[in-house]
Amino acid sequence: MALKHAINRVLNRGPARPLFGMVATRRARARGEQARFTYDRSSGSWLKRTPAGAVLLPAPQGKGIEQCEVFTKDVFLRDYDVQAGDVILDIGAGIGSETIPFSRWVGASGNVVAVEAHPATFATLERTCQLNGLENVKLVHAAVMDSDQPVMISNLPTEVSYENRIGAEGVEVTALTLTDLVRKYNLDRIDFLKMNIEGAELPALQGGSDALSLVRNAAIGCHDFLAEETGDDSYRTKDAVYEILIDAGFTVRRRDDDPRPWAADYLFASR
């Protein structure tokens, strides 16, 4: 994997980018995708256009919007189908892989509040929403925690930036609580809460007990599998998150039998 990233970094330079994009486009079309890759100078990312719209990627490979929709349904929507007019909180929106499908599904009568903590990732999310004209998405650059005190988030290379997490080192970012979000946008209901924030899910939920009463359905990504992989027990949150959701009045379903370790750690809550 490290060699693959190193090769991509060498090829992902000005003179080689048009050829790199052409090769990636041909490979995608050979797989049956109606896709075109070009380099987006304003974001420093690769743009993958398909009939459904555009996504930004760190390299000329990865999921288009159609594939993001399939992934979102598989991972986050086990017990709930998003409806037109829904209000969705996308906590840990990343580069928009779920934000875009959510926006399409809730339609003009719905709203998505997309929250991303890491500065560079947030900039990509913002550009993605601009490219797709997502007028029903409200963007928030902050970490959702148990207080409004600033926190540090790691600053990993682009190709592994999805692993950035709250900790003792990195870059300082603004923090807020779920309750702050509800007040900021004057929400009276949250039809679906998606949370995937690399181990910070426990303080995020602990700081949002008032807001949880407004949530009807949720998918919370826990990260106990990373505790097994790294030996860092701070990732072990699933049991505590389960109890918070039960105490908040949810029916909670687990996914322990999923063969994908990261997917097996998701909890699904509904009322």
Image (cartoon, helix red, strand yellow):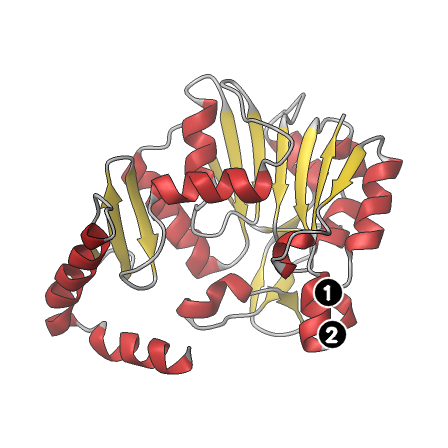
Picture residue at 61% right of the left edge, 64% below the top:
165
Picture residue at 26% right of the left edge, 50% below the top:
48
Instruction: Using residue 24 as the reference point, say whether residue 244 is left or right of it.
Output: right
Picture residue at 51% right of the left edge, 18% below the top:
85
Picture residue at 88% right of the left edge, 37% below the top:
247
x and y percentages locating residue 152 in the rendered image: 62, 66
Cβ atoms at labels 1 and 2 below 8 Å apart? yes
Quarter of the view holding residue 191: top right
Instruction: Using residue 191 as the reference point, say whether residue 249 is left or right of it.
Output: right
x and y percentages locating residue 95 in the rendered image: 43, 51
x and y percentages locating residue 135 in the rendered image: 38, 28
Write down the residue under mark 2: 232
**Kind of residue sitting beneath label 2:** Asp
Label 2 element class = loop
Q: Quadrant of the N terminus?
A: bottom left
Q: Nearer the viewer, residue 126 or 6?
A: 6
Write down the residue under mark 1: 235
